[in-house]
Amino acid sequence: MAHALPDSMSRPQVTDSRYREMVSAALDHISEGITVFDADLRLVTCNRAFLDLLAFPDTLAVPGTPFEAFIRHNAERGEYGPGDIDELVARRVADAETFRAHETRRRRPDGTVLLIRGYPLPHAGFITLYSDITELEQQQAEFTQHQATLEAHIAERTEALTRSNRELREALAYKQEMSVALRHSESRLRQITDTIPAHIAYFDHKRVYRYANKRYAEWFDRTVEAMVDAPIPEVIGQALADALEAHISASLAGAEVTYEYSKLGPDGARLYARSTLLPEFDADGKVLGCFVHSVDITDQRRTQNALAHAQKMEAIGQLTGGLAHDFNNMLTVVMGNLTGLRDAMPEAEEIEEYVVPAMSAAEGGAALIQRLLTFSRQQASEPMEVEVNALVLDIARLIRRSVPRSIQVSTRSLDDDLMTRAEPHQLQSAILNLALNARDAMPNGGQIDIECSLETLDGPAANDLEIAPGEYVQIAVTDNGTGIDGSILDRVFEPFFTTKRFGMGSGLGLSMVYGFVKQSAGGVRIRSRQAVGTTVALLLPKVETSLAAAPASSASQPQTDIENLLVLLVEDQANVRKVVRQHLAVLGCHVLEAENGNEAADIIERVPAIGLVLSDVVMPGGMNGLDLVRFTRRLRPSLPLLLMSGYAEHQHTEDDDRLTRVLPKPFSRLQLRDALQAVLGADAPTWQRETQ
């Protein structure tokens, strides 16, 4: 608190009249309608928004007006529907006399939906808040247009506040005449402003707070008493005061200002608010101070950020899926021709020198495509139950061999029996990737800590990670390296984004980690400070240990002879068709070819000797591979089909068709052989569902 000044220098005392004027001015700047009635159900005060919202005439706004007058006005204009007006009025007046807290929604005849909330006050009076929620209900399905609507609403409110401020100055003389009727104690007015669901404050031209309601004080972790006579930097912090200096100066110069800002909450989470500063003028037009009206928009910001991130990831996933199809077709041709060259010249010296490296590079390209599909969550995985502690201990041995001696690697588990369901090789790869990134961030040595624990995420924490609340197994990899600049922290999971020098990294490492974890129904949390270090935590859903039997080994499955099998090959790309035909010929099959689904359908009708159909999924024209399957099932239900696809979403059938399998591109000759044998050795299917 500031020291008391001599009488000649002290500021003027705020009189009851002035205090009521300040509160009345503040109430008229609030977009919600507000009424206060006393114990005799007579009007104490109301704001302009209330009169406009319910279309009441100004004649009813005089303090002392009975509550019954408002109800009768509504009943006479049909607000409550048909019925006896006296009965409608009496019932509502009787309900009001109970002075109970209530909340209700009412649809007016013009279609407006109002949220009406009433709260009892001391001495049996009550305050009622009226909110127009028509747009809120309509915009639930129009979230993407919310920002434009919100900006328009702000513009409308700004204009309304400007008009209200002008009308307030014009009505000042009338307000003074009504001061006797509006006299209330300071405690009563405090009850009213503290009930308003907004952050309200007032600071004078010296930038010293003279008033704050309870919500505003709590926003800055203070009491109401501590706010009075405190300068702005002392309340909101010097850093935030510096950031808002331009807005405060503009408002003290006479301008209405609306802006958004953020601050850290007590738990370290970032909070967001939207504030409007409304200058107060004296009779000569001099600015006396500013009213502050602020609302918490943290939930809105989080929702917008989550939607933007989801849209970006969806776009990347769609792009990845399209690229995968084309690359897989090209790699099928490359790998097939390399295989043919190796078979044609097995003894040539050039095979080891040229063909083997080329085949290795092609297989690496195929693996890269699979990693991209994993990132975009379009590549199916084979998850199983994994004991995380054991897996981390196992991969830690490899990590220690992969980092220099100047880097120490330690592991720690805070809980036992940390079971999750994930693809174990991808999980090991993710941990190794994080450890290698940590190694690169510590060129002069340091410490890598891998900690496993059980974490319980509540609603807000789970929403931030876009996962369901519950128990999660957390694997946290921490280093004390160079850290990550906060300006790029949100981009580290984007594919091909890297801060390493050209040639030192592909930019796919963290994006692969992110894709794997999201595909496993988990989340990734990253925290970093420059020159301090980085922690990346993988959170995977905890599961209970089960005793499910392991699947039977494929080695025990009988092998089917494909020698002399007549295969109908359906592929629209000539180069791919040529490679697959060569594979089939080497495997001893006889081959008929078709360029599209329509041509293949004609051949199936005319050639009953066909023993298997090998078809691409995506083909131009009227009939694709899936359409060909349906056609074949109607014509020849027992004919086996094997589909080829470079699209991840086509690499699994959606029904119980045991005679239809999907072979992902690119594939080797041995993989083709195994797929042919698998589909030929399948049990006879049942087609009732396909033909109904």
Image (cartoon, rainbow, N blue to C red):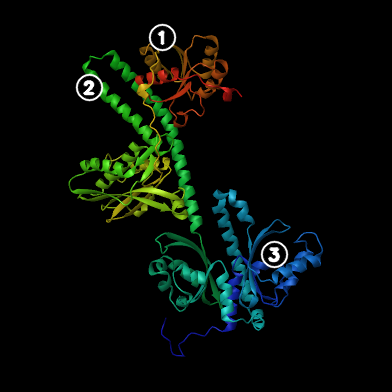
User: Residue 353 shows which numbered tag?
Assistant: 2
Query: Whole-Å distance between the Cαs marked 1 and 3?
Result: 86 Å
Nearer to us in this view, 53 or 592: 592
Question: Which element carries disc 2, helix, strand or loop?
Answer: helix
Query: Is 344 positioned to the left or the right of 664 in the image?
Result: left
Residue 117 appears in the rendering: no
Picture quarter with the C terminus: top right
Residue 266 placement: quadrant: bottom left
In x, y percent, where is residue 174? 67, 79
Q: Which amino acid does label 2 sit on?
A: Glu
| Residue at 50%, 57% in the rendered image | 299
Residue 532 placement: quadrant: bottom left
Label 1 sits on residue: 564
User: Residue 54 shows which numbered tag?
Assistant: 3
Q: Circle 2: is it few (<14), some (14-19), or many (20+) Cα within 10 Å?
A: few
Nearer to us in this view, 301 or 692: 692
Question: Which element carries disc 1, helix, strand or loop?
Answer: loop
Foreground tag (2 vs 1): 1
